[in-house]
Amino acid sequence: LSEEQARWKPAHGANSLIALVQHLGYVENWWFRVCFAGQADVNLFPDDDPDIDFRVPDERTVDDVVAFYRHEWELANDVIRSAPSLDEPAAFTKRKDGVPTLRWILNHMLEETARHAGHADITRELIDGAIGV
């Protein structure tokens, strides 16, 4: 897709493909490095801008965003591999219903990624008309 197509939004309030990919990079960072590993110093979410993950600056290209996402998921994989158990509790949480385990975080991220992959597939289909199988 072109840069213009990657930034196209199918409706007001919807997200572009590039914004979905950037968001997934942010949530990989948040759940694995910040929450699970307790690496507060790598938190990409400023306290005063909780929606930063969906806003892609004009100067940030598709290649930049894809590289960012791949980098964050590689770092997340390092955190996962170093965990002693899937039942290990997160070091940090803002959740009111208890401290999530690595197992819960992995399941949540599967759901998060699958949900946005569905959004992305619909948006891509609207852009190029091709129906995936």
Image (cartoon, grey):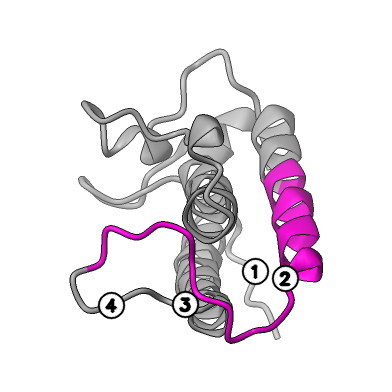
Does the stretch in magenta take in 78? yes
Distance of label 2 from label 1 (alpha carbons): 41 Å
Q: Tag 2, which secondary structure?
A: loop
Provide residue 79's location: percent of width, then percent of height: 72, 59
In this rendering, which labeled residue sits more in front, label 1 or label 4? 4
Q: Is the Cβ of the residue at disc 2 closer than 8 Å to that at disc 1?
A: no
Q: Which residue is mark 4?
A: 98
- Tag 3 residue: 108
The alpha-carbon separation of the residues under discs 3 and 4 comes to 15 Å
Disc on the earlier residue, 2 or 3: 2
Residue shown at the point (38%, 40%) measured from the top left: 54
Magenta stretch in the rendered image: 70-95
Badge 4 amino acid: Gly
Spatial separation of the CA atoms under disc 4 and disc 2: 19 Å
Frontmost residue, 114 versus 87? 87
Label 1 is placed on what type of residue?
A: Ala
Please give the residue where the numbered disc 2 appears in the rendered image. Answer: 83
- Mark 2 and mark 1 lie on one chain; the one further toward the N terminus is 2
Is 77 rendered above or below residue 86?
above
66 or 14: nearer the eye? 66
